[in-house]
Image: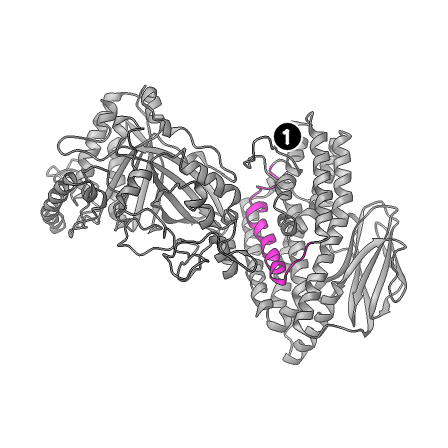
Amino acid sequence: MSPVTRTAAGLASLTVAAGLLAGCTSTAPAGGGAGDAGPITVNATDTACEVSATEAPAGNLTFRITNAGTKVTEFYLYAAGDRIMGEVENVGPGLSRDLIVEVPDGGAYTTACKPGMSGDGIRAPFTVTGSAQKATDTDAQLAAATAGYTRYVASQVDALVPTTRQFVDAVKAEDVAKAKELYPVSRTYWERIEPVAESFGDIDPRIDGREDDERDPGVGFTGYHRLEKDLWTTGLQSDSAAVADRLMADITDLANRTKTVELTPVQLANGAKELLDEVATGKITGEEDRYSHTDLWDFAANVEGSRAAVAALRPTVDEKDPTLGPLLDERFEAVEKLLQSYRDGDGYRLYTELTPADTKKMTAAVDALSEPVSRVAGAVTA
Amino acid sequence: MSPLHLSRRRLFGTAGAGVALAGAGAVAGYGLSGTAGATADGVVPFRGTHQGGIVTPAQDRLHFVALDLTSTDRAAVRDLLARWTAAAERMTAGRETAEGGALPANRYVAPADTGEALGLPPSSLTLTFGVGPGFFDKLGLADRRPAGLAPLPRFQGDRLDPARSGGDLCIQACADDPQVAVHAVRNLVRDGFGVTEVRWSQLGFGRTSSTSTGQATPRNLFGFKDGTNNLKAEEPDLLERHVWVGDEGPEWLRGGSYLVARRIRMHIETWDRSNLDEQQQIIGRDKGEGAPLSGTAEFDVADLAATGPSGPLIPDDSHIRLASEQENGGVRILRRGYNFVDGSDGRGHLDAGLFFVAFVRDPQRQYVPMQRRLARSDALSEYLEHNGSALFAVPPGLADGDDHWGRALLA
């Protein structure tokens, strides 16, 4: 980010405040709730992202995404600095989904389709004109931040449920190859919102427990990692289908509970930090996905989830500590760029393919990011 | 003779007198042997009702070594333990392992004492000896293996490295000068070649517990006071109840204890990014004073029932609650741990943590249930990784005369 004058920074923070409110997004099946400007259609294929308009007035915007390609896709609306204004995940081939985004401030934005759900996506500029009502005081900003993040959680849960369903179905159909392919994909949505899931203390151990966790008598090893072990190490077991059903039930339970979860700004900030802690202690060490070695998928998802939580708080951060936001951008981008260099097809290289030099580089990048992320809680409560 | 050598010997002269006095005191009264710290010369009594290094006011430095037996010859082991005892007794008094050992008259002889402690004071050195499960198995003494030495269960989150765990024997060296502690371990290890080999060893640089009311509570690497509620040397009744093995144990172990060692890596990098409130909520104490969150002063009794607007003042998953006597059926332990930083982990983080040492009367009844609760529920667990573990039976102190380590056990 280039140096800006004091005045410019002030203006930037106003724009960001709008961005925060823009965190107020929701996804709904196609045909639901039209925005102020009527739906903007997005025709997504494996190689193109055709958006029917390049400009719209400030307010509620509705994008109707139709996946005409062969790969699962995602659609994003970004503000400056790749701040996610809204996103719709996991749009399967042939499906349509709506993304409703509140964009109260005019300015330059970017649309992106991500066929195969990877990389920077196919991008195009998008202009919002005029301005709509926006929050002016910190309390309202923070309320909007938590509301926006809650909606982010909802969007992830909306994708978590069907992808887990596909994974579970593949396990039950004993289609090991397909299940292995779907395992890191469905975990992506889980890993992005893990601190929220962990706040329901009883669910997390069942969904994400490790084989060597200590359990009450009669409680077995279940969840993602049990199925991971079956798929990669021991082969499917007589109770794999039952474990898969249990996972689906737990994920459904989680989805229902997240609807009522209430988060504070500090919890958001801590969640952003905890996601990076997870990376440092679980992913860079290869601990989490010890059978499949798909740790880098989880790594990427943790970072994305952390960035979403920080982004929700960004307007307040920019007001309280103008130097912090640009630093966060720079460090998030450095980690994302590093991760991109470990891309392999639609996914990532396996943990077992990494050298000590690779993990050392990752640790350094995550440490460099975690330090400013750890300042967010202080900034929003200053 | 070098001046250095002379100064060490001169020192020994006065230190020796200190030993004799303290030794007499130890035999005379239980309380004194339990509480006696170093004399003015920095000598901690080597013989007495209990071994030194347990309720001795915790010294600043640690060198702990776990060894395996490479011999199954009981006589050879007994001979080694006798030699170790003699050398240990001399070293705790500030002497060389053998008279003139560092600078032998015959210059073609390899020095019997390695020499790096020449000129250094006794530094409150204590050497505490223990035996692990393998000691009994390898020497055909399985029927003497006490019940308390049953293997510790695997606790949630344990990532134990076999190369940092277990051991047939242990020697805990504590001193106020690290070089004195290292010198002691090094010389004992050297004498053991052919009968024992080092399995693992650990240096510690800052005590994390007080074992005497005369000591200020130190801080661990999380920056919090640690060991405020530790058992203290001045509480003989509590020690009797929680630390010293009584009639329930075999005769050779009565008046001794069990030593639980855990190498606990601390993820200090992630901890350091936690905000102060979160850190305090996780521990259950405030960081400055060390007071429980229900009180205002360090030694205020933690009120686990106290509640505020958002629930218990001392949170349900806080460390001090889960480790408390009240939540553990009245169980207490004597902690005697040390901070460590063993270089880095190869990924750009410090390999830092707490080398946890606790002395308990019955590990299965005291340590195991407590650690099980902590491993499962303690909010602090997120920042911890237990990667080494060992359990030893620590015999009682030695009688005056020719009593030596392991004598009663091998009799």
Residue A221 in view:
yes
Q: Name the residue under label 1.
A: A233
User: Which stretch did the figure color magenta?
Assistant: A261-290
Identify which residue, B118 or A219, lies in the foreground.
Answer: A219
Instruction: Give the secondary structure at mark 1.
Output: helix
Percent position of residue B297, x then y: 38, 61
Compared with residue A13, is residue A49 higher up or lower down, i.e. above or below? above
Mark 1 burial class by Cα count in 10 Å: few <14, some 14-19, many 20+: few
Percent position of residue B156, x then y: 52, 38
Report which quarter residue A368 is drawn in.
bottom right
* Residue shown at the point (47%, 37%) measured from the top left: B160
Counting labels gives 1
* Residue shown at the point (29%, 51%) measured from the top left: B60
Percent position of residue A79, x then y: 74, 66
Farthest residue, direction bottom? A7
Compared with residue B91, is residue B83 higher up or lower down, i.e. above or below? above
| Residue B291 on the magenta segment | no
Residue kind at label 1, given as amino acid type: Thr
Of helix, strand and loop, which mostly describes the magenta segment? helix
Residue B325 left/right relative to A142: left
Residue B110 in view:
no
Residue B342 left/right relative to B282: left
Identify which residue, A22 or B86, lies in the foreground.
Answer: A22
* Residue shown at the point (58%, 68%) measured from the top left: A381
Compared with residue A183, is residue B219 higher up or lower down, i.e. above or below? below
